[in-house]
Image (tube, rainbow, N blue to C red):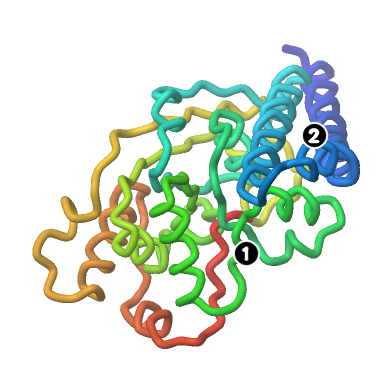
């Protein structure tokens, strides 16, 4: 490919990436004012409305991911996608890029999520995340764990990025223990998902217009479900059990668990958590 074609290809993907995010933002705003109320307000109860809203998010995210593929910004392959649809499981994934959650929810019609509290204040995302009943990460850490465990015990699936934020290339991951506490309290099956993007794009510390030399290709591997008890064994305390589980996830995702002090601070409530599973 000539230098001119390489330059043109890169400029096109910069434009197309920006266009996709404009479509995403405007879609969230318009859908929040029209589609969500139209389908959710007539529901007989809040749970039905919530599930309808999550189905709308599923179709919207699936459309957006395919739009990014059609315009040549990304491509992807997924292995084991059918396992994502099983109800009542805690889906954990690493978080290398900004659109990980979009790609995953595009394969899960019904799933609860933990989202940044800032998304409830963003005019483009506030209505969709509110209609879908997603859980805000701000406030009391103990209440956050209790709310997440309750949704799993009710038979709903929950998606969590245990790293707490997008990872930075070349830096060791730090995995707080809050996600491990949810798994231990709920006793729900844990479904691990590994996401890789080559070349890396939309990662933390890089603006959206900093596109790589070629489209990013995502490989999503859905593992086999397991129970926390299979990892923690006969841990004498919940603190040690949470540490063991966090270290297992750190090993799986190529990082390291957070220091014990973060766990002890999280157990002392009420407290404000900075854990941000979706960002």
* Secondary structure type for disc 1: strand
Mark 1 = which residue?
Answer: 136
Residue at the far top in the pictured view: 1
Picture residue at 34% right of the left edge, 76% below the top: 259
Q: In screen coordinates, is 263 left or right of 1?
A: left
Observer able to see residue 18: no
In this rendering, which labeled residue sits more in front, label 1 or label 2?
1
Taking depth in this image into account, of 157 and 64 the one nearest to the observer is 157
Picture residue at 35% right of the left edge, 50% below the top: 254
Mark 2 = which residue?
Answer: 17
CA–CA distance between discs 1 and 2?
27 Å
User: What x and y, as percent, mark residue 258?
Assistant: 37, 70
Please state, as top left, top right, bottom left or bottom right, where the N terminus lies in the image.
top right
How packed mark 2 is, by other alpha carbons closer than 10 Å (few <14, some 14-19, many 20 or more), is: many
Observer able to see residue 123: yes
Picture residue at 68% right of the left edge, 66% below the top: 117
Among numbered discs 1 and 2, the one appearing first in the sequence: 2
User: What x and y, as percent, mark residue 159?
Assistant: 49, 48
Task: Check residue 76 in the rendering and tell me which mark sits there, or answer none.
Answer: none
User: What x and y, as percent, mark residue 205?
Assistant: 66, 56
How packed mark 1 is, by other alpha carbons closer than 10 Å (few <14, some 14-19, many 20 or more), is: many
The vertical placement of 133 against 44, above or below, is below
* Secondary structure type for disc 2: helix
Taking depth in this image into account, of 259 and 227 the one nearest to the observer is 227
Q: How many marks?
A: 2
The vertical placement of 244 against 269, above or below, is above
């Amino acid at each position: 490919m000539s230098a001119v074609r390489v330059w043109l290809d890169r400029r096109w993907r910069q434009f197309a990436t920006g266009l996709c995010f404009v479509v995403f933002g405007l879609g969230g705003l318009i859908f929040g004012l029209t589609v969500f109320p139209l389908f959710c307000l007539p529901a007989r109860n809040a749970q039905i409305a919530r599930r309808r809203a999550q189905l709308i998010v599923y179709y919207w995210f699936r459309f957006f991911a395919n739009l990014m593929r059609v315009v040549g910004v990304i491509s992807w392959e997924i292995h084991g996608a059918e396992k994502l649809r099983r109800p009542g499981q805690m889906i954990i994934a690493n978080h290398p890029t900004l659109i990980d959650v979009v790609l995953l929810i595009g394969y899960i019609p019904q799933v609860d999520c933990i989202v940044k509290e800032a998304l409830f204040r963003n005019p483009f995302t506030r209505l969709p995340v509110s209609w879908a009943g997603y859980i805000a990460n701000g406030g009391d850490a103990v209440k956050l764990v209790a709310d997440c465990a309750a949704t799993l015990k009710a038979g709903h699936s929950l998606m969590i990025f245990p790293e707490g934020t997008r990872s930075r290339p070349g830096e060791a991951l730090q995995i707080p223990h809050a996600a491990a506490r949810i798994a231990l309290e709920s006793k729900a099956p844990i479904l691990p998902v590994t996401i890789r993007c080559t070349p890396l794009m939309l990662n933390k510390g890089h603006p959206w217009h900093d596109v790589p030399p070629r489209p990013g290709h995502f490989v999503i591997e859905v593992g086999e479900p397991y129970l926390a008890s299979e990892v923690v064994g006969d841990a004498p305390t919940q603190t040690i059990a949470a540490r063991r589980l966090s270290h297992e996830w750190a090993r799986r995702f190529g990082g390291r668990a957070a220091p014990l002090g973060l766990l002890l601070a999280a157990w002392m409530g009420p407290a404000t958590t900075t854990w941000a599973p979706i960002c």
